[in-house]
Image: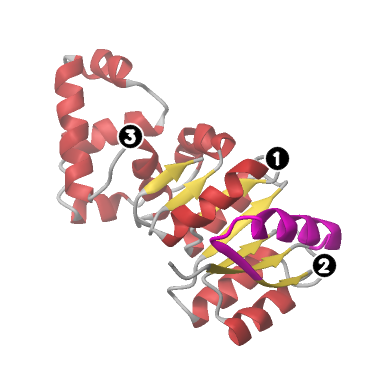
């Protein structure tokens, strides 16, 4: 039998903590080691219990979830921090991704939490469907790490394709803009993903926002 995924749940609403604990522990692969209601407790519990995953809200009294996540990741760069929140502010999403969080889910997507935990344990990063749909706009609103792209061997033409993807254009629209065939655009995208070690547009969006890849991203 595989060992259970040990998680710590942090949410400022104690009833949310208890509800999540009940829901998740119904899965035989998941063990809720502890719960807490603020960022300070999150940091303390992570140090004491070393959970596989820290499942955490963002807005809490005192130390926020983002501050707690930064502290945990500064102490353990391999920590798996997964945010579960009602707040889908672009600023929060970008900050969470850039600090190295393994994903960002919206609380309404309750059925996605257990699969997300398992995906994170397999090395993936996970995003709720609402977050995935907003990645193109986030790519436009943030400073892109184009120096990272060129360091990875991306040439100027490929960079043009990436910039148009960042604007939310599909392959046909990119082809029309650059006076190329759709097949040529698909070939460019394949080469770009191969050079960056990425799988699809979602991973490319995360890389564009953060300058780093978290493994195989998964939409939930």
Q: CA distance from mark 2 to mark 1?
A: 22 Å
Check disc 2 and report its element: helix, strand or loop: loop
Q: Is residue 174 visible?
A: yes
Residue bearing the label numbered 2: 61
Residue bearing the label numbered 3: 163
When the figure is inspected, residue 139 is found, relative to residue 23, above or below; the finding is: above
Residue 30 magenta-highlighted: yes
Q: Is residue 144 visible?
A: no
Q: CA distance from mark 3 to mark 2?
A: 39 Å
Which residues, given as a range, are shown in magenta? 12-32
Q: Identify the mark at residue 108; answer none if there is no mark.
A: 1
Check disc 3 and report its element: helix, strand or loop: helix
When the figure is inspected, residue 56 is found, relative to residue 173, above or below; the finding is: below
Q: Quadrant of residue 89?
A: top right
37, 20: nearer the viewer? 20
Q: CA distance from mark 1 to mark 3?
A: 32 Å
Residue under the point 44% across and 75% down = 77
Check disc 3: other Cα within 10 Å, few if <14, some if 14-19, many if 20+: some
């Amino acid at each position: 039998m595989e060992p259970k995924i040990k998680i710590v749940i942090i949410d400022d609403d104690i009833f949310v903590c208890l509800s999540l604990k009940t829901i998740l522990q119904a899965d035989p692969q998941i063990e809720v080691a502890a719960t807490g209601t603020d960022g300070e407790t999150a940091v303390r519990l992570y140090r004491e219990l070393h959970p596989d995953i820290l499942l955490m809200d963002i807005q809490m009294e005192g130390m926020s979830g983002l501050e707690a996540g930064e502290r945990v990741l500064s102490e353990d760069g391999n920590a798996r921090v997964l945010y579960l929140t009602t707040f889908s502010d672009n600023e929060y999403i970008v900050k969470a991704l850039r600090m190295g969080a393994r994903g960002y889910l919206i609380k309404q997507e309750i059925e996605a939490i257990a699969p997300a935990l398992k995906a994170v344990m397999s090395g993936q990063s996970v995003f709720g469907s609402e977050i995935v749909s907003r990645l193109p706009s986030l790519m436009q609103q943030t400073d892109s790490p184009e120096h990272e792209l060129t360091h990875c061997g991306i040439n100027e033409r490929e960079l043009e394709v990436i910039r148009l993807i960042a604007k939310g254009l599909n392959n046909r629209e990119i082809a029309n803009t650059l006076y190329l065939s759709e097949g040529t655009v698909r070939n460019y995208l394949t080469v770009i993903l191969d050079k960056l070690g990425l799988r699809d547009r979602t991973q490319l969006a995360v890389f564009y926002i953060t300058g780093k890849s978290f493994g195989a991203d998964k939409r939930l």
